[in-house]
């Protein structure tokens, strides 16, 4: 069975402390990608030097691209998408990691099920990938195709989990809003793309706890971005779904904010 080539896009900004860990998780894939594109977004630390001198051990081609100025993660990912040569594209944030079987299991599911996009939720870890994740590597992914209304009620994909067919329409809204990834997933689902969620965790992030400094302000920005993403879909003829999704979104935001204030 011939599987498509994978390009991995990593937006990089002052990620010297975590980038090697992310690249190591790609190098350790049981089915490595064709190429990795690190898009530096105006870093002031040693991120560029680290990427340029990273030893891939022949696992993939590593390309390092520099943005002329800091323009944000959406612009960096779009630059990587413009340069990608693989038939499918995966995204990995510079402070996240993958389990070793991530690309292999997703590629087989995408091929066998005729999917345009596949992804899931990322686990939150402190040090290393949990043993139960590695023990389940031989099992097939449990997937479900995501409809528009469920997607509008809850974001089905964390960016570092996503593998998507390369297409000119796969571009993150670059408007300064947060939740630009969610806006893209909704656009693709609304356009009829076959997008599937898998229940297994194959990507992992190191995330600060609720109550961390500045998190309340970040939640406000994320909520504004989410509302903009939902509104964009509603304006394209899905007003009924929007009417259902808006109160749910506001309720979830209130719960997150309350949890932040109570900690």
Image (spheres, rainbow, N blue to C red):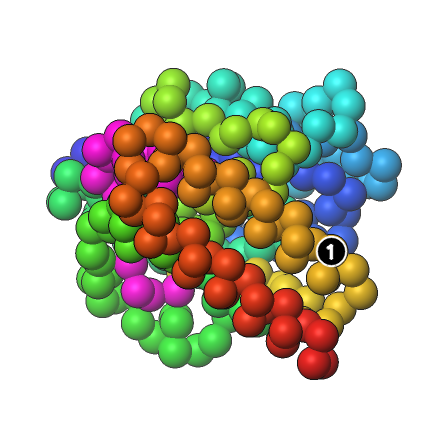
* Pick the front one: 169 or 152: 152
Residue under label 1, please give it. Answer: 217
Q: Quadrant of residue 192?
A: top left
The total number of labels drawn is 1
| Vertical order, 62 against 224 (above or below) | above
Q: Quadrant of the C terminus?
A: bottom right
Q: Quadrant of residue 39?
A: top right
Residue 191's spot in the image, x, y percent?
26, 30
Q: Is residue 75 left or right of residue 152?
A: right
**Residue 181 visible:** no
Q: Residue at x 33, y 29 (%)?
A: 236
Q: Is residue 191 magenta?
A: yes
Q: Residue at x 56, y 43 (%)?
A: 225
**Residue 12 visible:** yes
What's drawn in magenta, residue-wise? 183-201
Q: Secondary structure at mark 1?
A: helix
Q: Residue at x 39, y 71 (%)?
A: 134
Q: Is residue 208 left or right of residue 7?
A: right
| Vertical order, 93 against 1 (above or below) | below
Counting other residues with Cα less than 10 Å from the Cα at mark 1, is it few (<14), some (14-19), or many (20 or more)? few
Q: Quadrant of the N terminus?
A: top left
């Amino acid at each position: 069975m011939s599987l498509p080539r994978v390009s991995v896009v990593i937006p990089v900004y002052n990620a010297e402390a975590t980038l090697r860990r992310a690249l190591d998780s790609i190098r350790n894939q049981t089915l490595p990608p064709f190429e990795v594109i690190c898009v530096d977004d105006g870093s002031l630390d040693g991120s560029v030097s680290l990427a340029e001198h990273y030893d891939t051990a022949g696992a993939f081609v590593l390309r390092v691209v520099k943005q002329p100025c800091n323009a944000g993660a959406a612009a960096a990912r779009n630059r990587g998408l413009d340069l990608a040569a693989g038939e499918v594209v995966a995204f990995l944030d510079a402070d996240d990691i993958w389990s070793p079987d991530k690309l292999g299991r997703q590629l087989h599911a995408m091929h066998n099920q005729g999917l345009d996009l596949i992804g899931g939720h990322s686990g939150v870890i402190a040090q290393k990938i949990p043993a139960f994740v590695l023990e389940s590597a031989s099992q097939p992914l449990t997937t479900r195709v995501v409809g528009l209304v469920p997607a509008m009620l809850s974001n089905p994909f964390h960016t570092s989990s996503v593998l998507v067919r390369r297409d000119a329409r796969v571009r993150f809204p670059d408007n300064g809003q947060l939740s630009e990834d969610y806006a893209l997933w909704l656009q693709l689902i609304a356009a009829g793309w076959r997008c599937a969620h898998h229940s297994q965790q194959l990507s992992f992030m190191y995330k600060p706890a609720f109550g961390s400094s500045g998190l309340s302000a970040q939640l406000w920005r994320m909520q504004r971005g989410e509302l903009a993403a939902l509104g964009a879909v509603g304006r394209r003829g899905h007003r009924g779904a929007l009417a259902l999704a808006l109160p749910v979104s506001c309720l979830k935001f209130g719960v997150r904010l309350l949890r932040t204030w109570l900690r």
